[in-house]
Amino acid sequence: MKKTLKITAVFLLLITVSAFTTQSNIESQGYKIGDDATDFELENIDGSMVSLSDFKEAKGFIVVFTCNTCPYAVAYEDRVEALNKKYADLGYPVIAIMPNNTEVKPGDSMEAMQKRAKEKGFTFPYLMDEGQKIYPQYGATKTPHVYILEKYDEKNIVKYIGAIDDNYQDETEVKTKYVENAVDALLSGKDIEVKETRAIGCSIKV
Amino acid sequence: MKSVLLLSLFVFLPCSNPLINLGFTSENSFLSDSETLKIFNFEELENYLATKDKTKTYVVNFWATWCAPCVKELPYFEKLNKEYSNKKVEVILVSLDFPKHLETKLKPFLNKHKLKSEVILLNDVDSNTWIPKVNKDWSGAIPATIIYNQKKTIFYERSFEYKELETELKQFLN
């Protein structure tokens, strides 16, 4: 009898859940808002190894998973650079991480990253996710994919996940600058209004 | 347990398909010359799909010419469209190419590969609004595919081989 009740309860629960969800084969992995993001030690385009803990003065980070070869990522290159120019001195530097398998995407090799950074004059670290170990922990699925972290003592807490703004096609037509709004809110001690956004991007190549 | 889950999905999924439930239905209002590439925002895409034959199973693939894994799997979608057309299956290829590349990239690609499946260019920058309408779990990475009919909807954020695609489709055709 007890068992029947249990089964009925589970059945009802399943019905309730599935009534509001579409079945998909996506396993939600990676960080959610409020999670403590892992630090890392990844090679930068200048040969140095970079960790979040190196940035003693930072209040947080704008971590951008990006690459050379994705048109969406390329469309945002100048905007990522502008974010670093605006926010690095305010305590929120951009940390760019290239997550693709370079054997699948030779255009994202370290040499290619160095070349692109030079051409575009990137002032932020552009790191290679060697062995592709960091992006799955964050739960990044595409480029570009942004995680804004805020420092609490030794921890880096995830405060925003998603897109840079709401118009990948035309910077001049942007209505909402999601990342700027989020960092501005953090800087002024306010709640971030939009904590998660979606955008089209190129799947990370494994 | 699994069969219970499946059963409950069967019962309730028809209500949750955003692509066929939203928007009005006006027969033929969006049907145009097949030579002309349709360029829609998301609302127009939903409305267009709502006009389609509801007895069919639709395989809607989100792709772009610049997306290598998407281009790699296009032949599988084309083959599926051909092999299963007599089983009331229709493939629709929704391109996310940049509209500014319509003439220089998308049209030359379509001309070269002579795709038989219907191609629609989705031009809607407000992806934060429309991506969750396709599926709440979609991160926005492509390739992505949604298979649906009146009974059931499944969303896939992944690449396919032909056999895998066929296996997924077959569960809609019983």
Image (spheres, grey):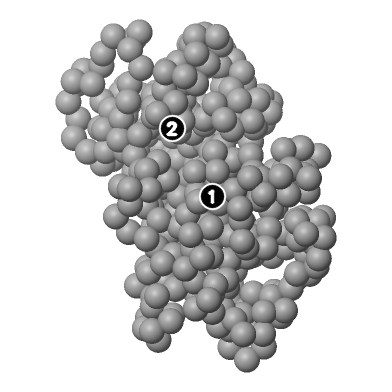
Relative to B38, is A130 on the left or the right? right
**Mark 2, residue position:** B98
Q: Chain of mark 2?
A: B
User: How many marks overall?
Assistant: 2
Q: In which image quadrant can residue A92 be found? A: bottom right
Relative to B128, is A4 on the left or the right? right
Task: Report the quarter where the N terminus of chain B lies.
Answer: bottom right
Relative to B57, is A36 on the left or the right? right
Residue A60 point in image, percent of width and height: 56, 78
Residue A77 is marked as 1
Residue B126 is marked as none
Q: Is residue A42 visible?
A: yes
Q: Is residue A162 visible?
A: no
Q: Which of the two residues, A68 or B142, is positioned nearer the viewer here?
A: A68
Looking at the picture, which amino acid does disc 1 mark?
A: Glu
Looking at the picture, which amino acid does disc 2 mark?
A: Phe
Q: Residue at x 37, y 69 (%)?
A: A181
Tag nearer the camera, 2 or 1: 1
Q: Please tell me whether mark 1 sits on a helix, a strand or a loop.
A: helix
Q: Residue at x 41, y 67 (%)?
A: A180
> Is the residue A165 above or below the residue B85 in the image?
below
